Image: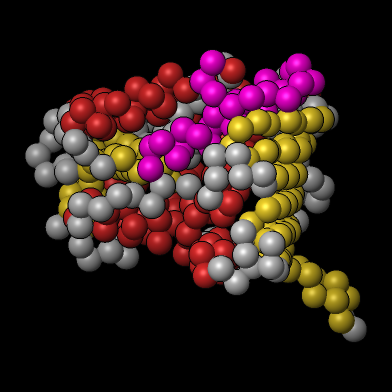
């Protein structure tokens, strides 16, 4: 039985808690959150009594073999590297960090401690993502040469208020939301990204000096191209949609996404209904436990998480300069 410490009990932690409660080979034994009310409530939801406001205290408790980090993105570098340094296996919510320096810090700490490090890219585990990868790997569409990932919706509050999406805390919209798409494009195409060009609009979030609508074009060393077109400020807020196209040398794949709003139009009028997203978290958590217990490579490694982040940081550099940005740590900040 794997004993897990949950660090961070905010919004996304609720999905993680639901997933942990379904497992028989792992259990959350402790919770840490800077807010004592949230920590206590999360512990109660998990049926445990051990909680703290100090994650370092949690790392010292008996029975904690691994941690699940659901804190704000800018804190990942410090918390994940501390956890790895304490000998704990690490599952860290995406993005792995908000800077390449923090990403390297986490990866090095995990390597030195000999622990498993997995980045929680939930999109990796949804039906549409997995089935697309299986078709690509089967060779049915030949070599992938073009991917278009287009998604939108009013996921965030329309004024983008609060610190949840502030650039200083999360890295901004391109980083915290864009890494979903850059990671998927890398996984599907299976090649190394070599350059990024991006454009953006700053409309509903102008008071934050943060881009809310953006498009990223990615070139790979295989010659393949990916285009990411994404927003989280669409109106109406209730609408969620995604369109994915993968072109290969012998065929193509078209699919939606895990947050699609389904539209039904009949004699009674137009109505919408959403899809359940929990199964992606369930699979993600189960995959982390399996890689720890079976001592296998995580399905999303720290290095893969770093590349997805680097691409988004390069996109932000491209937005600022209007230039194509070559991939490489020396080219992004």
Check the image and tell me how it is coloured.
secondary structure
Q: Is residue 20 above or below residue 4?
A: below
The answer to whether residue 100 is above or below residue 159 is: above
Residue 34 vs residue 219, the one in the foreground: 219
Locate residue 270, reporting x and y percent.
85, 72
Whether residue 302 sits left or right of residue 310 in the image: it is: left
For the question of whether residue 316 can be seen, the reply is: no
The residue sitting at 14% across, 57% down in the picture is: 1
Quadrant where the C terminus is found in the figure: top right
Q: What is the chief secondary structure element of the magenta stretch? A: helix
Q: How many marks?
A: 0
Question: Would you place residue 36 above or below residue 31 in this image?
Answer: above
Q: Residue at x 32, y 65 (%)?
A: 22
What residue is at 40 percent from the left and 56 percent from the top? 284
Residue 221 location (% of width, % of height): 60, 39
- Residue closer to the observer: 178 or 254: 254
Question: Which residue: 33% across, 59% down?
Answer: 286
Residue 135 found in image quarter: bottom right
Foreground pick, 178 / 248: 248
- What percent of the width, then of the height, locates residue 301? 38, 43
Q: Quadrant of residue 159?
A: top right
Taking the image as shown, residue 264 lies to the left or right of residue 145, namely: right
Q: Is residue 332 left or right of residue 228?
A: left
Magenta region: 301-330
Task: Give the image quarter of residue 265.
Answer: bottom right
Q: Position of residue 123 (x, y in %)?
A: 53, 53
Q: Is residue 81 left or right of residue 100?
A: left
Decide whether residue 320 is among the magenta residues. yes
Residue extending farthest to the left is 62
Q: Can I make out residue 198 in this image?
A: yes
Task: Assess whether residue 49 is covered by the magenta stretch.
Answer: no
């Amino acid at each position: 039985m794997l004993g897990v410490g949950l660090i961070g009990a905010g919004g996304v932690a609720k999905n993680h808690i639901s997933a942990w409660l379904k497992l028989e080979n792992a259990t959350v034994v402790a919770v840490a959150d800077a807010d004592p009310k949230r920590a206590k409530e999360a512990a109660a939801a998990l049926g445990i009594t051990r909680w703290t406001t100090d994650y370092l205290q949690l790392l010292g408790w008996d029975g904690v073999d691994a941690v699940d980090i659901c804190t704000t993105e800018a804190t990942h570098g410090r918390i994940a590297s501390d956890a790895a340094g304490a000998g704990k296996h690490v599952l860290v919510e995406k993005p792995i960090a908000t800077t390449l320096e923090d990403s390297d810090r986490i990866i090095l700490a995990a390597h030195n401690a000999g622990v498993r490090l997995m980045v929680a890219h939930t999109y990796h585990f949804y039906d549409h993502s997995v089935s697309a990868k299986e078709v690509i790997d089967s060779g049915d569409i030949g070599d992938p040469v073009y991917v278009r990932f287009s998604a939108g919706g009013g996921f965030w509050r329309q004024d983008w208020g609060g610190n949840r999406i502030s650039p200083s805390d999360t890295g901004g919209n391109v980083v915290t939301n864009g890494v979903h798409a850059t990671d998927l494009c890398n996984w599907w195409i299976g090649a190394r990204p070599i350059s990024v060009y991006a454009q953006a609009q700053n409309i509903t979030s102008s008071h934050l000096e943060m881009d809310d609508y953006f498009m990223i074009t990615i070139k790979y060393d295989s010659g393949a191209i990916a285009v990411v077109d994404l927003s989280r400020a669409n109106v109406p807020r209730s609408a969620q949609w995604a369109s994915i196209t993968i072109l290969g040398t012998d065929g193509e794949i078209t699919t939606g996404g895990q947050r699609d709003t389904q539209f039904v139009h009949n004699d009674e009028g137009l109505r919408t209904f959403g899809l359940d997203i929990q199964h992606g978290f369930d699979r993600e958590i189960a995959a982390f436990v399996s890689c720890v217990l079976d001592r296998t490579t995580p399905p999303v490694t720290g290095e893969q998480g770093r590349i997805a982040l680097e691409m988004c940081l390069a996109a932000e550099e491209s937005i600022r300069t209007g230039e194509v940005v070559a991939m490489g740590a020396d080219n992004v900040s």
